[in-house]
Image (spheres, rainbow, N blue to C red):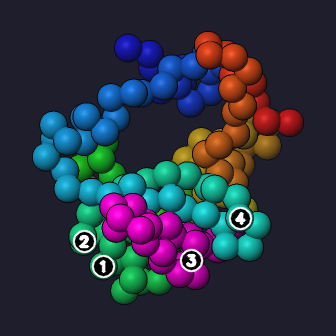
C-alpha cells in the first residue's frame, strides 16, 4: 500500500479501483457528488453524500459531504476556510448521483497544497495521465 504522499503528490498511477467496494463493505449509504465551479465549469472534486450531508448542504447553502474515510459529516471549509458556497444542486437521471454547482469562498478547494506557493490547490484534478502508469502535473 502506498502512502498518501505517493498518492497525492507522486507521478505514478495508483488508482483505488476498490473505493466503491470499500464504501459498500463499510455499510455506508452514500451517493457520489461531483463538485463543479458554477462559473468556469471546472470539476473541483468528487465526494460523497449521505442523506444527512445532502440535507445539511441545502440548509447551509454550502457543500457538506460525508467523509467515507473518516466516517463523519464534513462541512467543506470548516477548518481550512475553503468553503464552497452552493449555487444549485442537480440530480442525475437515475437519481444515484448529485452535482453541486458551487462558488469558492477562496481560491482553494483541495486539501493538498501547491509546493511552490503553499496555497491549497483550486481543485483536485491537478495531474494528467501520460500513459497507464505515469502522471504529470498540469502546466
Task: Give residue 81's quadrant in the image.
Answer: bottom right
Point out the stretch of residues depicted in magenta.
84-106
| Gap between marks 2 and 3 measured at Cα | 18 Å
* Tag nearer the camera, 3 or 1: 1
**Picture layout, residue 15 above or below residue 26:** above
In the rendered image, the residue lying farthest to the bottom is 59
Of the numbered discs in the image, which one, if any, rests on residue 55? 1
**Element assignment for label 2:** helix
Q: Residue at x 73, y 21 (%)?
A: 130
**Does the magenta stretch mainly form a helix, a strand or a loop?**
strand
Q: Residue at x 48, y 77 (%)?
A: 89
**Element assignment for label 3:** strand
Of the numbered discs in the image, which one, if any, rests on residue 41? 4
**Picture layout, residue 45 above or below residue 59:** above
Q: Which residue in the structure is indicated by mark 3?
A: 85
Q: Which residue in the structure is indicated by mark 2?
A: 52
Say which label, 3 or 4, has the lower sequence index.
4
| Gap between marks 2 and 4 measured at Cα | 26 Å
| Gap between marks 3 and 4 measured at Cα | 15 Å
Say which label, 3 or 1, has the lower sequence index.
1
Say which label, 2 or 4, has the lower sequence index.
4
Amino acid at each position: 500500500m502506498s502512502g498518501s504522499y505517493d498518492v497525492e503528490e507522486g507521478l505514478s498511477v495508483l488508482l483505488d479501483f476498490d473505493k466503491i467496494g470499500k464504501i459498500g463493505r463499510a455499510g455506508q449509504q452514500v451517493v457520489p457528488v461531483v463538485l463543479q465551479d458554477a462559473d468556469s465549469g471546472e470539476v473541483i472534486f468528487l465526494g460523497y453524500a449521505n442523506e444527512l450531508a445532502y440535507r445539511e448542504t441545502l440548509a447551509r447553502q454550502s457543500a457538506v459531504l460525508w467523509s467515507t474515510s473518516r466516517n463523519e459529516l464534513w462541512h467543506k471549509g470548516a477548518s481550512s476556510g475553503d468553503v464552497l458556497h452552493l449555487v444549485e444542486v442537480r440530480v442525475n437521471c437515475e437519481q444515484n448521483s448529485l452535482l453541486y454547482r458551487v462558488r469558492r469562498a477562496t481560491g482553494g478547494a483541495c486539501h493538498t497544497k501547491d509546493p511552490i506557493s503553499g496555497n491549497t490547490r483550486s481543485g483536485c484534478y491537478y495531474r494528467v495521465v501520460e500513459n497507464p502508469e505515469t502522471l504529470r502535473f498540469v502546466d
